[in-house]
Image (tube, coloured by chain):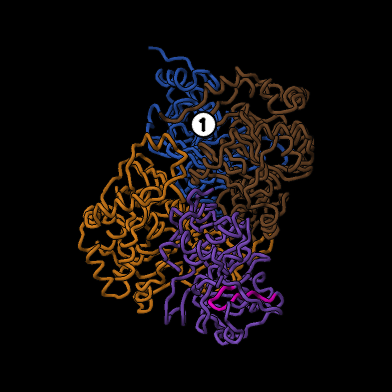
Chain colours: A blue, B purple, C brown, D orange
Amino acid sequence: MSAPNYSKTELMICVAARLFEDGATCFIGTGIPMLAAMLASKTTAPNLVPVFEFGGTGAILEELPRAVGEARTFHKGLSALGICDTMESAQRGFVDYGFLGGAQIDPYGNLNTVVIGSHDQPRARLPGSGGGNDVGSLCWRTIAIVQHDLRRFVPKVDFVTTPGYLTGPGAREAAGLPRGSGPMAVVSTLALMDYDPHTCRMRLKALHPGVTVEEVQANTGFDLLLAEQIGVNAPPSAEELRLLRQEIDPERLYI
Amino acid sequence: MSAPNYSKTELMICVAARLFEDGATCFIGTGIPMLAAMLASKTTAPNLVPVFEFGGTGAILEELPRAVGEARTFHKGLSALGICDTMESAQRGFVDYGFLGGAQIDPYGNLNTVVIGSHDQPRARLPGSGGGNDVGSLCWRTIAIVQHDLRRFVPKVDFVTTPGYLTGPGAREAAGLPRGSGPMAVVSTLALMDYDPHTCRMRLKALHPGVTVEEVQANTGFDLLLAEQIGVNAPPSAEELRLLRQEIDPERLYI
Amino acid sequence: MEVLESGQGELIQPFDLDEFREWNRTRKTRKLVEKVMTEQEAIAQFVQDGCYIGTELYGTVRCPMSLAREVVRQGRKNLRVCGQGVLELDLWLAAGLVKKLDITYIGLEVYGTSSCLRRAVESGQVETCVEWSNAAISWRMKAAAMGVPFLPTRSMLGTDLLKYSAAKVVQDPFTGLKVALLPALILDVALIHVHRADKFGNCQIDGISGFALEMARASKRLIVSTEQIIPTEEIRRAPDRTAIPYYLVDAVVHAPFGSHPGEMAYLYSRDEPAIKEWVETSKTADGAQDYLQTWVYGLPTHAVYLERVGQERLAQCVARRERRQA
Amino acid sequence: MEVLESGQGELIQPFDLDEFREWNRTRKTRKLVEKVMTEQEAIAQFVQDGCYIGTELYGTVRCPMSLAREVVRQGRKNLRVCGQGVLELDLWLAAGLVKKLDITYIGLEVYGTSSCLRRAVESGQVETCVEWSNAAISWRMKAAAMGVPFLPTRSMLGTDLLKYSAAKVVQDPFTGLKVALLPALILDVALIHVHRADKFGNCQIDGISGFALEMARASKRLIVSTEQIIPTEEIRRAPDRTAIPYYLVDAVVHAPFGSHPGEMAYLYSRDEPAIKEWVETSKTADGAQDYLQTWVYGLPTHAVYLERVGQERLAQCVARRERRQA
């Protein structure tokens, strides 16, 4: 049987979905994280507990939510309260994972979703933090999903919206952020990255099929550390693709 | 028609009930305040909005509540939330009146419900603040209901549980308590007192029928100021007594 | 209280808790007074030029869209706004109503960034953007709702978000932890859409409550729009369902499909083609003006708006609604 | 943070927010695990000598009395307790279980002061009383529930109550106002009684919620007793009714009439003769011991307790219950 065709987006969703730990709570944002969460809950993480920032916890994700507050985010859910409740739960340590996106990411996993250029006279005004800063501050581990190019993987973000490891080891704790929290992985269009535990810098962990280390480095605006063993991410399986295309996003909103 | 017979408690309830402003919100505590609130809502204050500290607002008081959290405190009510909601409403300035009791009261209306003697080796341990301090701190105006004798009307309370005017003019604001709040009246077994606006000291305002100024002073452990005109509180009317005895407390739990 | 770090952002809505208490004492009746009025009357009476205003929840979800459109129609200017917003704030930005923002997120969710926000900020039409996170802005309202000057949080620390906010970092005197203090946010006026309300303003919400409870309690004036007006007996039957009690409410506007083109949990789904129309047209300034002309200025009332949407599309939204577990 | 004034009371439950986060990460499963057990099992497993414990709401109203009696039966010692309590804390005081109190109110409401409290404190058996107001103790739990080290309040200021508390007064850096900071209260274990729960611990409460939401979120271990165990489908039908979600809960105890002799809104009224029996007998130390012998030590389980109360009296409590507006 030959490998099925798939898009870059489908691959990113699959790589992200496989990172979900079964039985964990996870903040789910709009877009790819929603597809990844649905895919995970139908494959390796059937006990995943989705948390949506505006109040829904423990929903059964039968149809893809298109917004973090819509009724599908608490469809057959276990609780439906408000944003203060979910964010305070995260502040108390009850939310294990969070997904993040951004226009820029730096070697320490700091993310920018506020401005390109200077804050007061921006070249481009971006949407703002939304729940991003809270997810990056309060969840135990975060996973960023970013398109891989030199405009996005930058040595220094124009604006630190969401804290990664800030300036390096110990910086989060020194700033007052919760002990033991921080970024875990980056899923890009080229590869999967994690962070070196000693330096807190981003590290290439596994390449997407057909991508080379050089290609990743050429599209990264800083020196990417290399894991001792650099793996290759398995392509989407036929079953993953079937779920994505037929059950999760049959209207092809995202894929 | 001759004046009906009545007890001291019935008179206190009537005098207290007449202090209710129609259309005001009022924290209602266990005991005499509940009877007074019910009487007021059936006579001069039909639009009284009772607030009970554990969450009930706008109940219709058809039967006398025996506890500040029981179902009668939100019977046909307009909202039933929790203690944080009601206390925060008071902190925001939404609760106009509150009733208070105490084992001791001083010339500035400070109340003691914690200990007689020293705190750490008390001669008598009393119940504690309960919601008393919050009512005295956060409501706009408070009315104390106290039995009138030398043990209770003291120059200095053993323990300031609930703030009256503290040490006098400006002391509440200096302590950080909300501007413009403070004690309004004391209903005792002998008389009705208010506070002199310049000195913030307790002032005799109106005597219960048959009571003299000398009798009140003899039962007060400090110099009571005298209002320019000292009135006499009307005895309970036949209608007030009928309501109290037949509709409000037919089981005679309190009267 | 020693401040370790201060955000350099402007506190664009300074506050005075004692003045707020006084307002709540003297300007908010506790009597059961009928408050039913139209969108036009409510906005005319309670929304002033230059006021600080907020909407809940957001554009595509339980959002007071009929009220938001009326604000545009009446052309209120120099608004200071907190958001967290999608379509509703986009309309205001496109109409040039917004002067200052306590911004958390303005975008089009699935459909990406907001062109209106870009144009308004990059051109300098919006003079000031003070940055906050979604939780932070909710907690700021919660502080006001609690009647306290600030709430602490462990969010926002160590970032430029804090630097361009008006938060302050202090050391907790109990444990030595660093925390950010978020200043209370007292809105001049808030717009909230609910499932049911009685004529006095007692409101029920189904599903998530977003930040409705906090915003309702943090506002000097509160305009509620509601899908349905119900008898007060229904409120009294289930006082534990009252999310917003009447005494917080200044106006009750009956607005069926009031969240259109957004959704209302259990009642109707979002109207995707209508949302996409805004996404497409708002990409250019001219397109956005055309949309405003067609869908806002050109339609005098919410009833006429619904007529133009048409029964068929509304019926489809109802048919596609989320249903409770059987 | 400059402290203007510090209460001299002991912080009898010191706290560490990062340790609480770690606890919530590692000791509270997010999986849907069945947690149904008996009173005996729950108290044996989760209540230790010397622990810091609290009960909600209070003695005569939606109170986990069957759990409170089991704590007495198992003779847990040196408890540190917050309360706000009527019959339930009286039983513990009478049984000599309490060493330290974060006290707000312990009394018999309508029936006056608590003789058990007087004996326990005046004799020195209770070593420490730290004073708080009812709102303050709830806000302390709310701080823990929010995951922050303190909440500010304008209550308690200027009084001996503050002096004998563990609060601290600071100046608000935004407006200059003086406020009291209330330290977070993280309980080792909490006991809460609810109307309905599923076997995983998702709980619904009818009527007022007291401080259940705050206490549930402020506790490392949470034992819920419930009038009724319902299928999870009922929870999923109305997620907006879940007051306490399952992941906070460690044990679900099925306890019909679990609040007896207190009431349960809409289900049963209080049992006045039973309450009066405690009021009378507890006036003397011997009387209180007799009561404990008769009603607690002498009855091995809640089922046997209810048998002794008798069907007739329970039926009267049901008949006299408050009903919702028709």
Helix, strand or loop at mark 1: helix
| Residues in magenta, as a range | B186-196
The N terminus of chain D lies in quadrant: bottom right
Q: How many marks?
A: 1
Q: Looking at the picture, which amino acid does disc 1 mark?
A: Ala
* Quarter residue B190 falls in: bottom right
- Mark yes or no: residue A8 visible: no
* Quarter residue D274 falls in: bottom left
* In magenta segment, residue B189: yes
Magenta stretch, main secondary structure, is: strand
Q: Could you classify mark 1 by the number of other residues whose Cα lies within 10 Å: few (under 14), some (14-19), or many (20 or more)?
A: many
Report the residue marked by disc 1.
A71
- Of C185 and B233, the residue lying toward us: B233
Determine whether D208 is above or below B108 in the image. above
Residue at 30%, 45% (x, y): give it: D35
* In magenta segment, residue A34: no
- Of A161 and D210, the residue lying toward us: D210
Q: Residue D278 in the image: x percent, y percent?
A: 31, 67
Q: Residue A94 in the image: x percent, y percent?
A: 44, 46
For this orientation, the residue located farthest to the front is B1
Residue at 68%, 66% (x, y): give it: B180
Q: Residue A107 in the image: x percent, y percent?
A: 57, 39
Determine whether C282 is above or below B222 in the image. above
- Of D6 and D276, the residue lying toward us: D276
Residue at 47%, 44% (x, y): give it: D325
Q: Residue D67 in the image: x percent, y percent?
A: 30, 56
- Mark yes or no: residue B122 visible: yes
Q: Chain of mark 1?
A: A
